[in-house]
Amino acid sequence: MQNIGGGNTMVFNNAARELLREAGENKSVITHDWWAYMVVTGCGGRVFYDSTPTLRYRQHGGNLVGTNSNWAARLKRIRMLFQGRFKHWNDCNISALLTLEHRLTPENREILQRFADARGMSLIPRLIHLKRSGIYRQTLLGNIGLIAAAILGKI
């Protein structure tokens, strides 16, 4: 449900590069780094995450998403949730991932299908299927937001 690295910090091997080439250009995805992360991990690639910062994140007014490091940014994301932006992002990501469904691992294919199906269900089945899908975010606040989005039908 969440990217763990910015595109400017990613390094790919040839297998990941070829997979991303196969995924194709002009996909209707929200951010290229999130898309690359989903494609590589969804198709069984391994991600090595180094938690030691080695560069500064350049934040500016034109950033689509930006950091979540302060309360103003968090409030902005909550507003985006209510406006349906995250639901739209998930629509785009699901649609794009389905074009690579044949390359996803069986486990990730099932997670994607459970997640996609759950989004159209009524409240209780939606929450059960989302829980069974295994999706999560990296922080407690992120997971609370995910649950709230699911309850509100904004996922």
Image (cartoon, grey):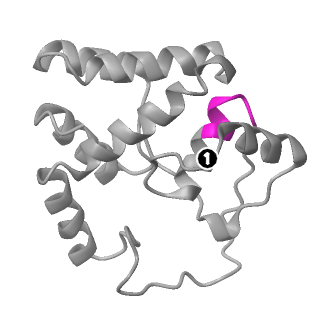
Please name the residue shown 35% across and 40% down the image: 90
Q: Quadrant of the N terminus?
A: top left
In the image, residue 101 lies in the stretch drawn in magenta: no
Magenta stretch bounds = 39-46
Camera-side residue: 39 or 69?
Answer: 39
The answer to whether one can see residue 4 in this image is: no
Which quadrant would residue 68 be assigned to in this image?
bottom left
Which quadrant would residue 72 be assigned to in this image?
bottom left
Q: Quadrant of the C terminus?
A: top left
The answer to whether one can see residue 151 in this image is: yes
Q: Identify the residue under disc 1.
A: 37
- Please provide percent x and percent y for residue 100: 61, 27
Relative to residue 32, is residue 19 depicted above or below?
Answer: above
Camera-side residue: 37 or 88?
Answer: 88
Relative to residue 88, is residue 117 depicted above or below?
Answer: above
- Please provide percent x and percent y for residue 80: 19, 59
- Seen as rendered, the residue at the extreme front is 26
Q: Of the residues shown, which amino acid type is indicated by label 1?
A: Tyr
| Left-right relation of 19 to 155 | right
The number of callouts visible is: 1
| Left-right relation of 1 to 108 | left
- Please provide percent x and percent y for residue 146: 27, 41
| Callout 1 crowding tier (Cα within 10 Å): few <14, some 14–19, many ≥20 | many
Please name the residue shown 71% across and 79% down the image: 54
Please name the residue shown 25% across and 67% down the image: 74
Please name the residue shown 33% across and 50% down the image: 142
- Please provide percent x and percent y for residue 150: 20, 33
Relative to residue 119, is residue 77 depicted above or below?
Answer: below
What kind of element bears circle 1?
A: helix
